[in-house]
Image (cartoon, rainbow, N blue to C red):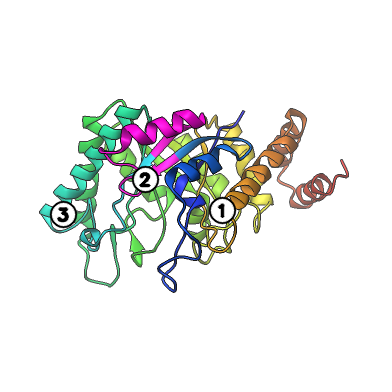
Amino acid sequence: MNRYSVILGNLGNTCDRFLPTGYKDVPPKSELIRQAAAIPGIEGIELVGTWDITEQNARDIHALLADAGLACVSIIPDLFSQKRWGLGSLSAKSADTRRQALEECRAVSRIAQQIGCPLINLWLGQDGYDYPLTADYRTQRAHLTENIHTVAGEFPDLRYALEYKPKEPRNFSFHARAADTLLMASETGLSNVGVCIDVGHAFMAGENVAESAVLLQHYGEKLFHMHFNDNYRSWDDDMIVGSVHVVEYLELLHWLRETGYAGWYSMDQYPYREDGAAAVRESVAFLRDLETLLTDARRADLRKLIAAGDATATTRYLRELLFARS
């Protein structure tokens, strides 16, 4: 049985660069947690450091989650929404900035230990570059690897998932694709460092997400975490799951089961104008309905279709499956 979670902020106010105040009001954290607990299938919450949880309020947030029957499945250090990270965090050219970023990761790791959260999700959105001849690719990647190794080595009881995205807010990200992120995770030499696939980021990167998942699992079972959303592949639209891609999602869920992925299925979307809880509810319902389609018999059918490699037969099977003719 898959375990579903949601990033808490998805249920609150989401803003863009055209309306920095956002399109909705900001409910209190207790209300957001209550909304999450009411969504069928949601059992876990992801929190963002400084946005949702700090060393000062960790006990209170943990109590709210416990009262709602929700687990904290991941904490995301805020290494992207503060001015001090504008030129990078763990890979910054400034040694002082790198030190501050490392301390932020340590603080979030201590919080995770305190509340029993098993995973730190590192989305290093400011670690990259914008123009040619402005980044030292060798040195800055070395800084990044060294700092990830340092914090993961200091907290061996936690897992660290490196989340990749090809661009935004920087024009080029150091963690841009599944393969280059896997290389860095492997380069740390630590078993508790892996990768998070955000499905929308993978679409942006031009990836076949199912193949990316298989790649990460094949090389050391490094797929630690999953973020689910949808987009039109040209941007990180963070839409309702299944609103654009259906067959790709069916293939992804098939291969997640084939490769033994045991992590959380976490919703990460930005419903700017939609009701947040309703959007997340639809995303979870879509994934659960797809899982219902993937019976043992149908998964056996998919294995045969994959082995045969006949695109026409595969397309026929999917058409009949999705339109309830088999």
Residue 308 in sight: yes
Reading the image, the residue beneath label 3 is: 97
Residue corresponding to mark 1: 276
Residue 129 position by quadrant = bottom left
* Residue at image location 61% in from the left, 40% down from the top: 39
The region drawn magenta spans: 46-74
Depth check, front residue: 140 or 84: 84
Residue 204's place in the image compared with 181, above or below, is: below
Q: Is residue 76 magenta?
A: no
Q: Earlier in the sequence, mark 1 or mark 3?
A: 3
Under tag 2, what secondary structure? loop
Observer-side mark, 2 or 3, equals 2
The residue at which mark 2 appears reads as 52
Residue type at mark 2: give it: Asp
Q: Which numbered disc, 1 or 2, marks the residue that appears first in the sequence?
A: 2
Identity, as a three-letter code, of the amino acid under mark 1: Gly
Label 2, label 3: how far apart the Cα atoms are? 22 Å
Q: Quadrant of the N terminus?
A: top right
Q: CA distance from mark 1 to mark 3?
A: 35 Å
Q: Tell us which disc is closer to us: 1 or 3.
A: 1
In the rendering, at what x and y percent does residue 125 appear? Answer: 34, 57
